[in-house]
Image (cartoon, helix red, strand yellow):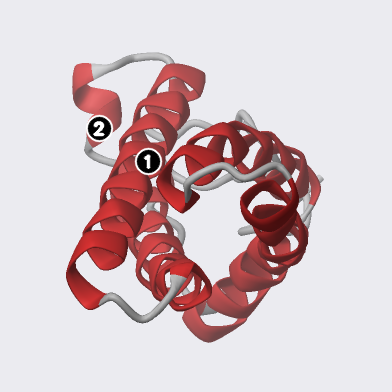
Amino acid sequence: MENSESVAGLSGPDGPLLRLVRDRRIAFLLVGGFNTAWAYVLFIGFELGLDRGYMVSLVLTHVIGTTTAFILYRKLVFRVTGHVLLDYVRFQIVYAGAFAINAVCLPLLVEVASLKPIIAQFFFVFVTTMLSWFGHQHFSFRRKDPA
């Protein structure tokens, strides 16, 4: 079943998750919720396991988390074809804005507000999620309207 409805600026044929969840918006939120939790678990793992500092944990989490999100959205929800590298670059551009804000705010929360990095990142996860939602709404995986 092909669905031309755009969710958060993403459009394309329905992915396999739409066989279980008939609403594209719900599928988008399920993948986003999973990826948000996954990225936070990665951050905790890097913080507890690497002992290289919270900014290193943030960078590693960003690279792995956004790549995971890209693959999941592209394969499970939207099934767009072609433009893999262009889509990935555009996807990273959206997350680069959220990452830049995170990279400024995380040290402020840790160094100025004296929060532990894991706690500070927990609070900021919700901010980056909202920022990426609005970025994807108008940019990532966008295809020209055939009409």
Left or right: 2, with 25 as reference point: left
Disc 1 to disc 2: CB gap under 8 Å: yes
Name above or below for residue 108 compared with residue 93.
above
Residue 65 versus residue 35 in the image, above or below: below
User: Who's the residue at 59% across and 44% down the image?
Assistant: 11
Q: From the viewer's side, name the closer residue of 96 and 84.
A: 96
Q: Is mark 2 on a helix, strand or loop?
A: helix
- Residue occupied by mark 1: 77
Q: Residues within 10 Å of mark 1 (few under 14, many from 20)?
A: many
> Which label number is shown at residue 136?
none
How many residues crowd around disc 2 within 10 Å: few (fewer than 14), some, or many (20 or more)? many
The residue singled out by tag 2 in the image is 17
Q: In this view, does 102 lie to the left or right of 2?
A: right
Residue, x 68% and y 65% (percent of image)? 103
Give residue 34's quadrant in the image: top left
Q: Where is residue 52 in the image (x, y as percent from the top left)?
A: 36, 81
On the image, the x and y values in percent for residue 98 come to: 71, 56
Q: Which of 117 and 83 is in front in this view?
A: 117
